[in-house]
Amino acid sequence: MKKMLIFIGAIVCIFVASYWFFNRLGRQPINQATKTCLVTGASSGIGKEIAREMVKRGWKVIGVARRNDKLKELEVELGQAFISYKCDVGSTTQIHEVSDEIKKQGLQPTLFFLNAGTGELEQKWQLSTAVHQRTFATNYFGVIAWIEEWLTLAKDLGGGTFVATSSVLALFATPVCAAYATSKIALVHCFDSLRRQYLYDNIGFSIALPGPTDTEMLKGAVDNLPFVHKPEDEAKYIIDGVFAVKQQIEPSWFYSCMLRVLNWLPDKVALKLL
Ligand SMILES: NC(=O)c1ccc[n+]([C@@H]2O[C@H](COP(=O)([O-])OP(=O)(O)OC[C@H]3O[C@@H](n4cnc5c(N)ncnc54)[C@H](OP(=O)(O)O)[C@@H]3O)[C@@H](O)[C@H]2O)c1
């Protein structure tokens, strides 16, 4: 019995060590040549905290969002290290124009936090294609369009990393969130595919799956949920994961585990436990 346990223990250790080793093979560290990053959704919540933390770490931050007043407030707080651009990421035309402007200014980001996101609750019997289109325009195409604009330039600069903010709802699609959850799992699959495609080209793709975080997006729901994180903690965890070259960053262990388990259960049981 003892020998059997030692044998199983050794197999598990070998498996974990091999997984750890091969998982790191081919991964490139973050290109810090220009120490310039871009953050979408920088006007509030997790994106604002990512901007603050990156400035603290000595990076120049290009912040993007629609609410110019909020961006200007952050410019005053963070000084010259923060440069803002008003942009609706739901418009590929605006992303193209703003990218051109950034390039004209001579800014050369190599790290992209594609974090802007939106969510609308979908009530029963009111399924709407328009809600799905709006959600995908921001949450999915509002990520892809930035990659399209900057991929080759990042390569020319010696490498780049794209980080998308998905959600734990990519792991388990709750009712009333069909468009949101689908847009977030679409990002996970997209980044998995791109990461494999560019594995040996110094282009990295990381995805973050935050759990409930106390931001404007969650307003009104915070008191009903356990283990809600602060946006500044979420931002730091995501940034640490990015610099550790993790491909999937999951700051909320409780929700990551719980929602995976719910996904295995029959719907009737899962819905009772929610
Ligand atoms: N809070 C949570 O519990 C939670 C959990 C999992 C994942 N997330 C994800 O985390 C990301 C950040 O959200 P948050 O929690 O920090 O919420 P938030 O405080 O509401 O921030 C959302 C940010 O996205 C920007 N944004 C939204 N639509 C935009 C658009 N069309 N164009 C440009 N910017 C846009 C907003 O800026 P403007 O309004 O100024 O444009 C804002 O800066 C989102 O992708 C969200 O899905 C949040």
Image: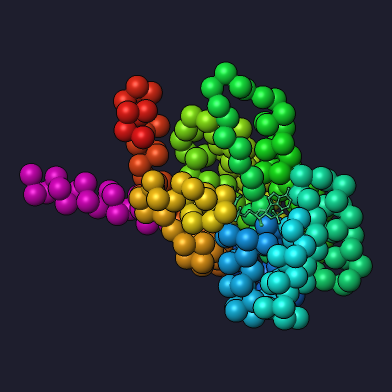
Q: Is residue 7 magenta?
A: yes
Q: What x and y, as percent, mark residue 106?
A: 87, 72
Q: What x and y, as percent, mark residue 254?
A: 36, 49
Q: Looking at the rendering, which quadrant does residue 269 occupy?
A: top left
Q: Nearer the viewer, residue 138 or 161?
A: 138
Residue at 32% across / 33% down in the picture?
Answer: 273
Q: Looking at the picture, does residue 157 appear above or below residue 249?
A: below
Q: What x and y, as percent, mark residue 95?
A: 82, 52
Q: Nearer the viewer, residue 271 or 248?
A: 271
Q: Looking at the rendering, which quadrant does residue 53 occupy?
A: bottom right
Asked whether residue 105 appears in the rendered view, the answer is yes
Q: Quadrant of the C terminus?
A: top left
Q: Quadrant of the N terminus?
A: top left
Q: Looking at the picture, does residue 43 appear above or below residue 3?
A: below
Q: Is residue 191 magenta?
A: no
Q: Looking at the picture, does residue 29 appear above or below residue 139?
A: below
Residue at 67% across / 44% down in the picture?
Answer: 139
Segment tinted magenta in the rendering: 1-22
Residue farthest toward the top in the current orientation of the protein: 125
Q: What x and y, as percent, mark residue 165?
A: 59, 51
Q: Looking at the picture, does residue 266 appear above or below residue 3?
A: above
Residue at 39% across / 47% down in the picture?
Answer: 225
Residue at 80% across / 59% down in the picture?
Answer: 86
Asked whether residue 253 appears in the rendered view, the answer is no
Q: Nearer the viewer, residue 211 or 72?
A: 72
Q: Main secondary structure of the magenta part?
A: helix
Residue farthest toward the front in the current orientation of the protein: 220
Q: Nearer the viewer, residue 246 or 231?
A: 231
Residue farthest toward the left in the current orientation of the protein: 1
